[in-house]
Image: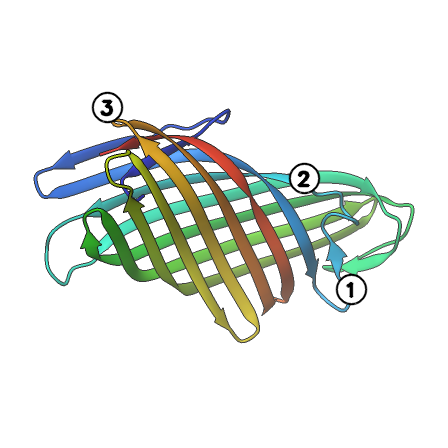
Amino acid sequence: MRKSLVAVALMSATPAAFSAPLIDVYAGAYTWNAEISGDIATGSDKVDLEKDLDFDKTRENVFYIGLEHPVPLVPNVRLRHMAIADDQRNTLTRGFSFGGGTFVAGNTVRSDLDLDMTDLTLYYSPLDNWLNLDLGLNVRRLDGEFTIESGAQRGHEKAEKTIPMLHVAAQADLPLTGFYVGAEVNAVSYDGSKLQDSNLHVGWASDFLLGVELGFSRMDLELDDVSDLDSDITIGGPYLALALRF
């Protein structure tokens, strides 16, 4: 899991890994196309990302680097950056207000979504053999912007927040087969807001470090009045990956 460098099949990826005695350094990058759904609001009007703005597929770029070591009481560390960017055009079938702009039925609107998330994960590995278990804290810096434009009308809103989350990850190697199953969850819920991203996967690793991995990733982003923005967004879908394990 944490020592698997994933390159999503049919999408670009550039993984790399290094190791020294008693210290493991791992890094990677991949692009994942997934479905996006849900709504956003800056007032009483909820804007549906699919029905109102025609969002469907989105692209997420992920880059990470981590370090594991045997020093007692000092946590392992992983730094991960996720960037989501998408834009759409659509003709409205109903009117709504968003971010200071008023949009009416029949208008053609252009919408832009930019969401950057940087995670600092500090974790311990109480189990590290055929069964790997990681427990720790994930601190996420969230920076989001959403813009809707039509003619002279423009609605714009930003959300900025630093959020601590519980981090749990596990992977089990199936004996004598080269197959493994695993999962990872980062989650928190407070003051009406909820953030959770999860990953379930099954993979196979050969004796030559190469393997394949099939999984499903999902991210839920519920914000309640964070920088005047409310959201209930889900991003998720399956992926097929090539993997290197060290």
State yes or no: discs 3 and 2 in contact (Cβ < 8 Å): no
Cα–Cα gap, marks 1 and 2: 20 Å
The x and y percentages for residue 47 are 75, 56
- For marks 3 and 2 on the same chain, the one whose residue lies earlier in the sequence: 2
Category of crowding for the residue at label 2, using alpha-carbon neighbours closer than 10 angstroms: few (below 14), some (14–19), many (at least 20): some
- Which label lies toward us, 1 or 3? 3
Q: Residue 159, how many percent across, how many down?
A: 57, 59
Q: Amino acid at mark 3?
A: Phe
Image point (60%, 53%), residue name: 234
| Residue 60 position in % (x across, y down) | 52, 40
Task: In the rendered view, tell whether residue 87 sits above or below residue 72.
Answer: above
- Amino acid carrying label 2: it is Asp
User: Does residue 23 appear to the left or right of 43 in the view shown?
Assistant: left
Question: In the orientation shown, which residue stands out farthest toward the left?
Answer: 21
Give the labeled residue for mark 1. Answer: 45
Give the residue type that dot 1 points to: Asp
What is the quadrant of residue 211 in the picture? top left
Q: Secondary structure at mark 3?
A: loop
Left or right: 245 with respect to 53? left
Q: Quadrant location of residue 136? A: bottom left
Which residue is drawn at the image coordinates 27% and 40% (left, top)? 3
Does label 1 or label 2 sit earlier along the sequence? 1
Neighbor class of circle 1 (other Cα within 10 Å; few <14, some 14-19, many 20+) is few
Q: Residue at x 80, y 60 (%)?
A: 97
Q: In the rendered structure, which disc, 1 or 3, sits on the residue that comes first in sequence?
A: 1
Quadrant (top left/top right/bottom left/bottom right) for the N terminus: top left
Q: Which mark is residue 208?
A: 3
Asked if marks 1 and 3 touch (Cβ < 8 Å), the reply is no
Which residue is more in the foreground, 90 or 206? 206
Disc 2: which residue: 87
Q: Is label 1 in a helix, a strand or a loop?
A: loop
